[in-house]
Image (cartoon, rainbow, N blue to C red):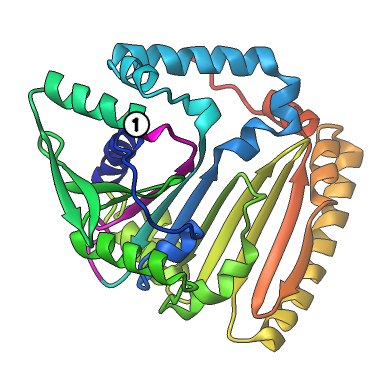
């Protein structure tokens, strides 16, 4: 997808474009446009500090080595070293946001972390010189920013809103609006009722989270290369009957999964929760019976027994847990295609 490619390009640019700006500190979510209809956050530090990562240090070191090798091949490592920036030490989280009611390509990226402003600024200058230019310095809303135009792609505006937050926008208007919200320290004023309701279902303790309106997800699906796929079309039809939903995954000792769907009000959510709890109860009995015939289903029994359906105001919330031991068993039991 073109937008995914632009996100990768803009993130790489944002990591290298840090300059000192004298403005206050605010929560990154508060900086997003009011018309935001999709928010995805990846909490790198939470993942790196999780029990499972600490218990598998050798594998993580191998993964880090592979990533660093890729950065070396692309010529990025030397600039990160010059900037005294360690991807695994200094990057806390990345948030991607997509607006509704306009071109989905006009997304926003927010990076949280720790940066050495002077060294990174020097690295940017040196990298731009070596590349023969391509980065234009400008000011937006009285804040120093960079116009970055990757080859055969659209311009992104990248800058630092404080010592711990970098922003990359597709438009100057969104950049200026983020600066204004930062200076005013106002809470988010999202237009979407679904987004407002669902924000209470995600938090910074989660490893990966997504909040989205059903209408935007449907729009993205209709514009995808797989839009003609019957399964995709069926999913789009279901989405059009919903307001929105959230998805969260938390990696620690085990994997916690959470899915939330917003309804009209708390009473409706409770009504749906009652029905779903009955269905979950039936599923537990069916799987338990199957496990008596086939021991492989004992793992599924363990997982299904963790499923809980609750409500959170107007939100219907489904939670479950998978231990890494059970995940390993599931993977071992997957059918292997024969050549």
Answer above or below: position of 269 versus 324. below
Answer above or below: position of 58 versus 193. above
Between 12 and 161, the one nearer to me in the picture = 161
Is residue 54 visible in the rendered structure shown here?
yes
Q: Residues within 10 Å of mark 1 (few under 14, many from 20)?
A: some
Is residue 242 visible in the rendered structure shown here?
no
Residue 219 in the image: state x and y as whole percent: 32, 64
Q: Which residue is depicted at the point 51% across and 32% down? A: 90
Quadrant assignment, res 45: top right
Name the element at disc 1. helix
Please say whether residue 299 is one of the residues in the magenta stretch. no
- Which residue is identified by label 1? 118
Q: Residue furthest left?
A: 132
User: Where is the N terminus found, in terms of image quarters?
Assistant: top left
Answer above or below: position of 217 versus 77. below
* Magenta residue span: 102-117
Between 32 and 100, the one nearer to me in the picture = 32
């Amino acid at each position: 997808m073109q937008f995914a490619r632009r996100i990768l390009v803009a993130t790489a640019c944002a990591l290298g474009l840090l300059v000192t700006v004298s403005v206050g500190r605010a929560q990154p979510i508060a900086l997003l446009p009011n018309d935001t209809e999709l928010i995805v956050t990846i909490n790198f530090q939470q993942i790196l500090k999780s029990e499972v990562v600490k218990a598998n240090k050798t594998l993580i070191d191998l993964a880090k080595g592979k990533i660093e090798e890729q950065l070396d091949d692309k010529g990025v490592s030397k600039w990160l070293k010059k900037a005294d920036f360690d991807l695994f030490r200094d990057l806390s989280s990345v948030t991607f946001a997509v607006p509704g009611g306009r071109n989905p390509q006009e997304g926003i990226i927010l990076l949280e972390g720790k940066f050495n402003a002077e060294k990174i600024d020097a690295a940017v200058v040196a990298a731009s010189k070596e590349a023969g230019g391509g980065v234009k310095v400008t000011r937006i809303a009285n804040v120093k920013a960079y116009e970055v135009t990757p080859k055969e792609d659209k311009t992104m505006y990248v800058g630092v809103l404080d010592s711990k937050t970098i922003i990359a926008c597709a438009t100057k208007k969104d950049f200026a609006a983020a600066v204004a919200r930062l200076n005013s320290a106002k809470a988010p004023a999202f237009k979407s009722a679904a987004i407002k309701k669902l924000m209470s279902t995600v938090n910074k303790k989660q490893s990966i989270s997504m909040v989205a309106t059903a209408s935007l997800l449907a729009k993205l699906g209709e514009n995808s290369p797989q839009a003609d796929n019957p399964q995709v079309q069926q999913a789009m039809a279901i989405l059009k009957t919903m307001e929105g939903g959230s998805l969260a995954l938390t990696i620690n000792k085990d994997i916690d999964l959470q899915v939330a769907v917003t309804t009209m009000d708390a009473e409706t959510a409770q009504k749906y929760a009652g029905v779903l709890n009955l269905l979950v109860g039936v599923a537990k009995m069916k799987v338990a019976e199957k496990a008596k015939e086939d021991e492989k289903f004992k793992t599924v029994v363990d997982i299904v027994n963790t499923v809980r359906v609750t409500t959170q105001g107007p939100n219907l919330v489904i939670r479950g847990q998978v231990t890494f031991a059970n995940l390993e068993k599931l993977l071992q039991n997957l059918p292997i295609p024969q050549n």
